[in-house]
């Protein structure tokens, strides 16, 4: 285990920012810490980096204790590299000089290796002002990797970029981290970013890690309604369990998680779980449609409730069309005495 965080807390006076937080990261693993604004993500990075002292708890890097309430190892002695939101390159230095900043003399081979790895060999002698946002972030990543740190911290490094560039840069970053076998912690509020990039996703809420696991586990099996609605689009439908099925206004639905006979609660149905069958005699009607090309979000008024379904773009039902609504696949059910 390269990074271990045990019962980490940080208080500013009476304000609790982090509350007995636990998090682990294995060598070569990219962990995304996903949470809403104000959840404590950047504070967590500052504690890992050594810029803050915890109120209680411990942080270990490569089995070495680097933070507790009494002792904090200095940031420069932790073997941690940081990629900030805005790249923070030195404007008066070239790309090569930025990457090599702080390296010992004779590191030209390492600088050249990283320039090639991030695809910027032709930009070695340029100044940061001539780079695009994506290129600047790749330089910042190369600079963080240059001294071969034990751990890389990425503080929402794609947030200032447009959507298309973010998607391309995510792939570049993942490739570079894999090539270096780097262990990385990414903090983000972007669900798509966390799910598409990380090996493990940890959901941070109210200063605690509420759930962690693979992107598939987190998306398919949220531990509570708060995560189900935060991570992806879910329609919440009241229901109860009868003969192993969830009885709802949309019919009988198969539960994905373990349920007990007679339980009353809420089914969280993903928009992609809905199937809309065009039917002139259908009891539901399409009342809204947002077209994205490859798919479309279709709003449907059923006899008892309104739903949003995600359909294949070119074949998505049009507004005014009568449809029959089916729920395909299994869904998660949250009993009333447990859901948040």
Image: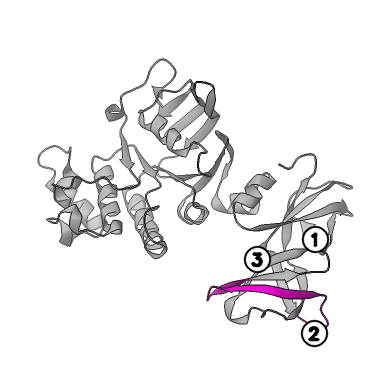
For the residue pair 241 and 182, the one nearer the viewer reads as 241
Q: Residue at x 76, y 75 (%)?
A: 285
Q: Which residues are magenta?
A: 278-297
**Residue found at the far left of this picture:** 106
The picture quadrant where one finds residue 247 is bottom right
* Residue to which mark 2 is pinned: 280
Q: Residue at x 17, y 44 (%)?
A: 100
The picture quadrant where one finds residue 329 is bottom right
Q: Nearer the viewer, mark 2 or mark 3?
A: 2
Rendered image coloring scheme: one colour
Disc 2 versus disc 1: distance between alpha carbons?
Answer: 24 Å
* Residue to which mark 1 is pinned: 253
Which dot marks residue 332?
Answer: none
Which dot marks residue 272?
Answer: 3
Reading the chain from its start, which is encountered first: label 2 or label 3?
3
Reading the chain from its start, which is encountered first: label 2 or label 1?
1
Horizontal and vertical percent for residue 91?
17, 48
The picture quadrant where one finds residue 204 is top right
Horizontal and vertical percent for residue 258?
77, 48
For the residue pair 310 and 179, the one nearer the viewer reads as 310
Tag 3, which secondary structure? helix
- Residue 194 in view: yes
Determine crowd level at label 2: few under 14, some 14-19, many 20+ residues with C-alpha closer than 10 A. Answer: few
Point out the image quarter for the C terminus. Answer: top right
């Amino acid at each position: 285990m390269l990074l271990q965080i045990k019962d980490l807390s940080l208080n500013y006076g009476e304000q609790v920012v982090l509350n007995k937080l636990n998090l682990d990261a294995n060598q070569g693993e990219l962990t995304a810490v996903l949470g809403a604004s104000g959840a404590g993500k950047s504070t967590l990075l500052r504690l890992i980096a050594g810029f803050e002292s915890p109120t209680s708890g411990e942080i270990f890097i490569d089995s070495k204790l680097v933070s507790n309430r009494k002792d904090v190892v200095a940031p420069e002695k932790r073997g941690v590299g940081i990629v900030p939101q805005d790249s923070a390159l030195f404007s008066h230095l070239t790309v090569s000089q930025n990457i090599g900043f702080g390296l010992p003399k004779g590191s030209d081979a390492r600088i050249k290796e990283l320039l090639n790895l991030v695809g910027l060999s032709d930009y070695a002698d340029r100044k940061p002002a001539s780079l695009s946002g994506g290129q600047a972030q790749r330089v910042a990543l190369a600079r963080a990797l240059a001294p071969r740190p034990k751990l890389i911290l990425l503080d929402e490094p794609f947030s200032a970029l447009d959507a298309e560039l973010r998607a391309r840069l995510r792939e570049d970053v993942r490739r570079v981290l894999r090539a270096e076998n780097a262990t990385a912690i990414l903090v983000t509020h972007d669900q798509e970013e966390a799910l598409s990039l990380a090996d493990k996703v940890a959901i941070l809420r109210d200063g605690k890690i509420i759930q962690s696991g693979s992107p598939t586990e987190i998306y398919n099996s949220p531990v509570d309604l708060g995560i189900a609605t935060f991570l992806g689009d879910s329609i919440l439908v009241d229901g109860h369990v009868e003969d192993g099925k969830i009885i709802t206004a949309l019919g009988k639905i198969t539960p994905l998680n373990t349920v007990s006979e007679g339980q009353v609660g809420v089914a969280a149905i993903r928009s992609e779980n809905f199937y809309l069958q065009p039917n002139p005699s259908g009891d539901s009607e399409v009342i809204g449609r947002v077209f994205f090309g490859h798919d479309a979000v279709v709003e449907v008024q059923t006899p008892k409730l309104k739903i949003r379904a995600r359909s294949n773009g070119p074949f998505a039902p049009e507004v005014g069309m009568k449809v029959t609504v089916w729920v395909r696949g299994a869904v998660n059910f949250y009993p009333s005495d447990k859901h948040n």
